Amino acid sequence: MTEVLVIAGAGLLIAFVNGANDVSKGIATLVGSGVTDYRRALHWGTLCTALGALAAANLTSTMITTFGNGLLAPGVTATFTATLATLFGAAAWVLFATRTGLPVSTTHAIVGAIAGVGGVAYGLHGINWTAI
């Protein structure tokens, strides 16, 4: 049960840094056009991002299968430590890129973290390079 809570916390962290990076794109037009003020636009952005995350969780079974199984070589099962390192690594990169103004894709950060952590944890043969 503790492992599930830790992974959920890491998942919330990556969701937070993803939102910090992307929500401004959605709310800029609300503020720029004068429809609402900045604080209310942030609330709208938070609400819509949360609803989008819930919808995505229900609609993205193919992507979850690919990330969950398709990027590691057949027979390789991700360990708790590798999963945690992947989530924290991707979150750290997205946060760093967001804070420094670098362009970033959370999806690319996750794939890169899977490749990096997987290469270290399981060796280069543990990665399904054709899928990546």
Image (cartoon, grey):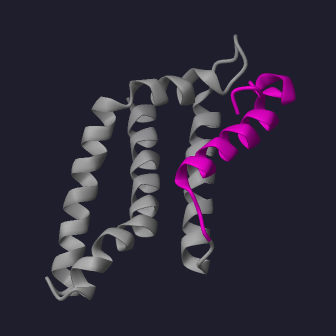
Q: Which residues are magenta?
A: 103-132
Q: Residue at x 45, y 39 (%)?
A: 7
**Res 18 → quadrant:** bottom left
Q: Residue furthest top?
A: 75
Q: Is residue 40 above or below residue 69?
A: below
For the N terminus, the image quarter is top left
The answer to whether residue 109 is left or right of residue 8 is: right
Q: Residue at x 74, y 24 (%)?
A: 128
**Res 27 → quadrant:** bottom left
The answer to whether residue 41 is left or right of residue 23 is: left
| Percent x, y of residue 86 | 62, 43
Q: Residue 111: within the magenta?
A: yes
Q: Residue furthest right?
A: 124
Q: Nearer the viewer, residue 129 or 83?
A: 129
| Percent x, y of residue 4 | 41, 33
For the C terminus, the image quarter is top right
Q: Main secondary structure of the magenta part?
A: helix
Q: Residue at x 70, y 12 (%)?
A: 74
The answer to whether residue 61 is left or right of residue 82 is: left
Q: Is residue 107 above or below residue 16?
A: above
Q: Is residue 37 above or below residue 105?
A: below
Q: Residue 1: within the magenta?
A: no
Q: Residue at x 17, y 88 (%)?
A: 34
**Res 99 → quadrant:** bottom right
The answer to whether residue 105 is left or right of residue 16 is: right
